[in-house]
Amino acid sequence: MASLKFRGNPANTNGNLPTVGQKVTFSKLVKSDLSEATNSTYSGKRKVLNIFPSIDTGTCAASVRQFNKLASDMRNTVVLNVSLDLPFAQSRFCGAEGIKNCESLSGFKSSFGTDWGLSLTDSPLAGLYARAVVVLSEDDKVLHTELVGDIVDEPNYEAALKALA
């Protein structure tokens, strides 16, 4: 279990993020066309997973916008925005915001949050994902992780970019 905050109040996840150097997989994340995505869907590419509670909150939306800007300069890298929002809500937001450089994936049919230690077990957001960034190499080894200390804060974008350098 990892401890973090939600608006300064204690919150916890069901486990811990994968560790740097660990090889990881994910499955059954749902793309906007309702097809399933796994880590092998992006085989041979580096992956930045921007994980958050809901696209319909200010901080989550800001992180998607910022990673969309940053993604245009990333080589052989895909940015994946992962939440429990339905693909329809993710598509609506991305369409309205002009998000073209990232892909959104929904975990509504997946054990992703449980498997990766990201499911919030308490706080008003219990059941949703904590805010985190995980950077993976082309062969799905963890290069960087960040569990954001307070869910209302944005992630450290520079640290994620540094892991890709």
Image (cartoon, rainbow, N blue to C red):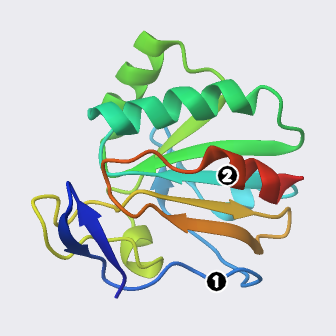
Give SS at disc 1: loop
What quarter of the picture does the N terminus occupy? bottom left
Name the one closer to the observer, 22 or 105.
22
Which quadrant of the structure image shows residue 91? top left
Instruction: Decide if residue 32 is in sight here.
Output: no
Dot 1: within a 10 Å radius of its alpha carbon, few (fewer than 14), some, or many (20 or more) residues?
A: some
Residue position for label 1: 19
- How busy is the neighbourhood of tag 2: few (under 14 within 10 Å), some, or many (20 plus)? many
The relative height of residue 109 versus residue 1 in the rendered view (above or below) is above
Q: Where does residue 38 sit, x and y in percent of width and height?
A: 61, 61
**In this view of the protein, which residue sits in the foreground, 39 or 59?**
59
- The picture places residue 57, in percent across and down from the top left corner, at 27, 35
Cα–Cα span, label 1 and label 2: 15 Å
Identify which amino acid the numbered label 2 is placed on: Val
Q: Residue at x 70, y 55 (%)?
A: 159
Q: Is residue 95 left or right of residue 53?
A: right
Name the residue carrying label 2. 48
Image check: 81 left or right of 121? Answer: right
Of 59 and 117, the residue lying toward us: 59
The residue under the point 63% across, 20% down is 100
SS of the residue under disc 2: strand
| Three-letter code, disc 1 | Thr
Point out the tag, 1 or 2, that comes first from the N-terminus.
1
Q: Position of residue 148 (x, y in %)?
A: 44, 60
Q: 128 or 103, which is in the foreground?
A: 128
Residue 52 can be seen in this image: yes
Q: Is residue 115 above or below residue 38?
A: below
